[in-house]
Amino acid sequence: MSDQSATTTDPSTAPSAPTNPDVKVSNRGRTSAPIANANSAEYDVPEFELFGAVGPRGLPPMTEFLDVWDVDMMRKQDETNKVLHHTAMYHSEYLIVRRAQEFQIKITFNRPYDANKDKIAVEFVIGASPQYSKNTYIPVFPNEERRSPWQGRIIKTSDNMLIMGIIPTATSIVGKYHMYVAVVTPFGIRRTKRDKSREVYVLFNPWAAADAVFLDDDTEREECVMTETGIIYHGSHDDVAERHWNYGQFNYGVLDACLYILDRSEMPIANRGDPIKVARKASAMLDNRDDGGVLVGNWSGNYTYGVAPTAWTGSTEILLTYANRKIPVCYAQCWVYAGVFNSFLRCLGIPSRVVTNFVSAHDNDGNLKTDVILDENGRMDRSRTRDSIWNYHCWTESYMSRPDLPAGFGGWQVVDATPQETSDGMYRCGPASVHAIKHGYICYPFDAPFVFAEVNSDMVFYSRRRDGTMETVKVNRSHVGRMVLTKAAGTQDRRDITEQYKFPEGSAEERTVMEKAELYSCKRETSNPPIADVDLLLSNLEVSLGDDFQLSLEFVNRSNYRRTVEAYISGSVIYYTGVTSSEFLFTTPTIKIGPGQNVKESVSVEAKQYMKLLVEQSNLHFIVTGKVIETGHIVTAMKVVRLHNPVLRVKVSGPAVVNEEMMAVVEFTNPFTTSLEDVNIRMEGSGIMMPMSKHYKLITGGSSITWSEFFSPQRAGTSRLIATLDCPTLRQVHGEATLTVEA
Amino acid sequence: MSDQSATTTDPSTAPSAPTNPDVKVSNRGRTSAPIANANSAEYDVPEFELFGAVGPRGLPPMTEFLDVWDVDMMRKQDETNKVLHHTAMYHSEYLIVRRAQEFQIKITFNRPYDANKDKIAVEFVIGASPQYSKNTYIPVFPNEERRSPWQGRIIKTSDNMLIMGIIPTATSIVGKYHMYVAVVTPFGIRRTKRDKSREVYVLFNPWAAADAVFLDDDTEREECVMTETGIIYHGSHDDVAERHWNYGQFNYGVLDACLYILDRSEMPIANRGDPIKVARKASAMLDNRDDGGVLVGNWSGNYTYGVAPTAWTGSTEILLTYANRKIPVCYAQCWVYAGVFNSFLRCLGIPSRVVTNFVSAHDNDGNLKTDVILDENGRMDRSRTRDSIWNYHCWTESYMSRPDLPAGFGGWQVVDATPQETSDGMYRCGPASVHAIKHGYICYPFDAPFVFAEVNSDMVFYSRRRDGTMETVKVNRSHVGRMVLTKAAGTQDRRDITEQYKFPEGSAEERTVMEKAELYSCKRETSNPPIADVDLLLSNLEVSLGDDFQLSLEFVNRSNYRRTVEAYISGSVIYYTGVTSSEFLFTTPTIKIGPGQNVKESVSVEAKQYMKLLVEQSNLHFIVTGKVIETGHIVTAMKVVRLHNPVLRVKVSGPAVVNEEMMAVVEFTNPFTTSLEDVNIRMEGSGIMMPMSKHYKLITGGSSITWSEFFSPQRAGTSRLIATLDCPTLRQVHGEATLTVEA
């Protein structure tokens, strides 16, 4: 007997997720317990753990056994723990220590501790599902016969007090642990109650040789772990500009915000001792795409619902906003991603620095070409030229060993949080070994082909025929990856680290590296179109925003014949991503050059041509292309002119002593004849002032404003006050002042 | 003069994304055009493209120039294009060809084509932003002097008709192209109108030596590209079960569904010619997590709002449902992921096969240990044993070269769409070279350490002391990765491919490989606890669901002394993921064994103990642990008993001729005394029957049902009708029938 009803399955009505595509399915059947992936999830170890069934008369009185009266984590800024572990700078009331280095705690009992008789353990627990074999539950013993991964020893006993030394392993999970003291009695284990003051943060340790992030250089370590302010370079390789940035990794709440980022990413706790995995995860989590991460990227020029990328003064406000409001922060461009990522890494103890690659190829993944399409006359075809080269791109380098790769690829690693439009889908990049990139070993994870293309792409100029086919007419192999800069350790100077990424242009080593990269399927342009015997040079320029100026071109005829160049000179306002916003100048001179002669040509550019069209970074881009009539060869030249913005003047006055009030003054004069509307000024300084902002509805043309603010430095030493001014018509105005605070 | 208002920035009120964390930001400023990432996005090439400004009198009459009257794509199933390109099986009216192989089209003009005078081009366009340099716009010319990447030639002319041969490059983008015929006139280019019938699909070509997916073996190619039904193995290594699966890659709509998956992933079109990138992207897109992909994983036993993973008969219904409804399909477990992934790969022309790894370690990423925690007496501590080992795990292998790696790592690659809980965050895996895994070169992308751990982990037994510390008491190095099976090409037999993944257990090569993997920071258990001199063996069993049976244990004393074992015998119902659902048997015999003697012990298991507790795959797991009293050593043994389900009988009757009606009969008898409720039966057969289903509200104990269905085979050849029965209390019941259809 059966009760039945027959249907044909129409695929369009077959069951699928009822309403919400993100159907929540439990872990039941899949894992025996959910994977622990939140440091903030709490697991309370039982206060009493029985060894067997309780007899009919219940437990005997426990008064005769050792009892814990007090636990002192020795967590003050000036106590040895924080001083020796280089964590006194963290604005935190909790104990913060580093791996592979001993720290001390003080336990007071109801009677003196007897090493021969009493059995105690100090237990460290992290996450919701502590397990000994996953290193999320770690008992530490004061004596040698009972071993555990973390070493313990008695440093001193005196009356009822015991000072114990504890060394976390060099591979310990990085994060916040709870600490308990357990006393073993014949009936069971008795523990201290959970107490927030006994929480301890364990960080990476660049000072310990056994740690994967060990960096054996005092100056570098001081810069890349301990320094809170830095300089991020931008502009163009021949006119470099500086942006001061407050990393603020020691500010109140920043460490917790960094751990929140890892929790939000649902990264399994058991993996959080591996700097490779932590850096890779964070490179994904700093952007909001895919995973609801920290920052929303926006290159559009419209920042109405958030803060313009150019307006930020540092990372603190971004990290704290994200941790408090738990939604992505608006808006970021590459230096914001790189700066916040740098704060994250330094905060957790991974040495890191922000670098800038001038003329950076983008959105190429194993394709070493950036295409420029010219028409048959040699004029650039903007509608068909879709690739862009960024004037500069910032990323972060982190320092670590790479045990997952063959020997030789440890050291500095590229990690990049700026979202790319590449094939691999996830918006993340690295860690990719800088050494592997230099030597063309791009077969090793993670994302090395992408970074290799950023510094090594060729610019390929095509001439497009009427029937749609293309001919390669020029290959420029030295335009991309022109210079890689980072702030020098210990000074305010620039350090050129181009040679860490590539061998000199034209050297034998460079050719070998390019061949090796091709072995790993990087596709290069192989054609070698004839090189024109006419050179075209554009002179360097330093121009202030609002100035009229002359663009000078020089045509050099290297041949013994007369040459005629039909040139196309185009001037555009561009984004720093190389994308054209609008063309403001176009002229087509014909230049005749005698044999072996030079001819100079000058083009006048007036401020009124470009001022109304500017986008936030005030970059003008001149591209000159042309055809030599006699030979049909193509000549090209390009130049980015960075218009220098007016500056913000920042001054401090007063005693410059810890906890004494002093004054900061920010002054700005509107140099234009038109008004600036909706102006925001931001200011902050690590250890001296948390981020502040002030809003001006209107600053009329030619007028000045002065913002005075009282503040009290919290920390002695040299620090820097960083300010930015931002409004829709004028962005990227900044200023800073250095001050030395006395204790 | 200035209008101002000052505020301190409170981080908790600083701007962040207004309401929706997924703020949509345009590409403006970031890229000059959106990156083309949808094959379905259309770009219509202009019908007339002028070469210059139109004069005052307008265009001259165009009648004197060559005009296209008709284009024949020669796309019928029996025409040479589809036969030679092995695409006649696709149920599609469009032309489908493979890369690196010539296909033909026939163009009819208003007059005979004159090769010396007329200039034509056949243009192929894919995606919304066609570019010559990105290979998304490809003009093809009939003569040699005008070159383009795709070669063209005139095969034949006759009267006004021209047959042209076209060879797409071996690296062409895979997807659907639009085709135009363009005629160059002195005034401009004149094109055919867009016409859907001129669309052409270009696929990977395993028959072409130049293609990255070239597989030089007829039998393998026939199986791994052209075969629509297959067998997926499950059960346990000593009692293997078979599940027939209808991959259905040639069914109507499946090819479009596969392209929709790539579009939905927003994979840039320019990357879709690379099988590595396509396979990696698909491994992410087959699961709904992160990206709204095809399938929702569910291991919980509760499938109320979808189809139970065990109920599917093939991939077609899943792929078509996803493409039609555009939301993830419920529900999948590993073989469903592997089966649908296999359909996707075969459909696009990448050779692929489903493999099953028996005893598969999971959720390990570079950690080669799976932990079992015993208490001090040797009894398993289920609350502390959190790791699980899957009875089996299915993944997919795809065949391709690996130009991104050093030579020697091409060939079969592991790709796995089943979501894992690992560190790398993205739910995807591979391609990982099988050869690299065998030889321990796990430093090469993608995800090789994870796959290496699946086949090479050790089971580590710990004894947990009262104070919380652990001691390693036994390491079983051969339990995991016991056997890897796939269906043999060209037959219905099993093929053991374990030796492609690992060297023989205990061989010198195996030790070398494990050492090499450790170099790349795979963490192994290094301790070598003493091996007990008592062995414990569990005999093999074949048990039908509902049977009582005896579990036989044998204790072998290899010593010359008397031995006493205190044993803990635990029987549980488990999921195939190794996760325990409930324990139904527990007994603690003490066994005394004389010197050099064997003792047999037998444990009775009654059906009533386990029947009420069963979960879908009806697996029982016996774990025996114990302590040898005299030596303190630990003995362990484990066995998975797969309960054999009743079968579904499938029969066909009738003529078995294409387009003639015949009948399928599915019969089932409820072998139990209790009723089965809410029973679904599904049936399908590639080329003969699209997925059908029938629902029975109730099948009472002992009663039988018969479902008869008429169908008409659409295709000649051998095919298979696959049926499953599924209800909440009885899952994984299947049957199949083979039939040979005549033309």
Image: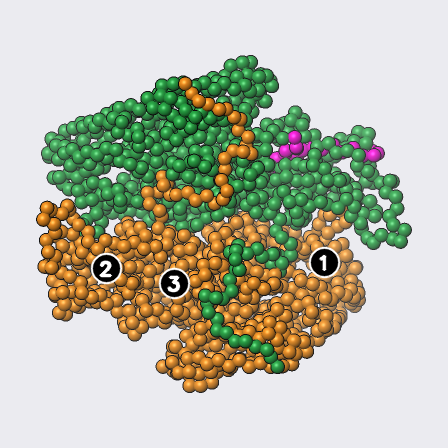
Chain colours: A green, B orange
Answer with left or right where residue A491 lies relative to residue B467: left
Question: In what quadrant of the picture does the N terminus of chain A appear?
Answer: bottom right
Q: Secondary structure at mark 1?
A: loop
Q: In terms of sequence position, does the residue under pointer 1 or pointer 2 come before the other? A: 2
Q: Which residue is mark 1?
A: B380
Q: Which residue is mark 2?
A: B193
Q: Which residues are magenta?
A: A93-112
- Residue B256 marker: 3
Which residue type does callout 2 highlight?
A: Lys
Say what amino acid the circle numbered 3 marks: Asp
| Residue B292: percent from left, percent from top | 48, 55
Q: Secondary structure at mark 2?
A: loop
Percent from the top left, x then y, of residue B405? 41, 52
**In the rendering, at what x and y percent does residue A68 appear?**
79, 36
Task: Quadrant for the C terminus of chain A, please.
Answer: top right
Nearest the viewer among A481 and B28 is: B28
**How far from the left and from the top, in percent, is residue B571?**
71, 66
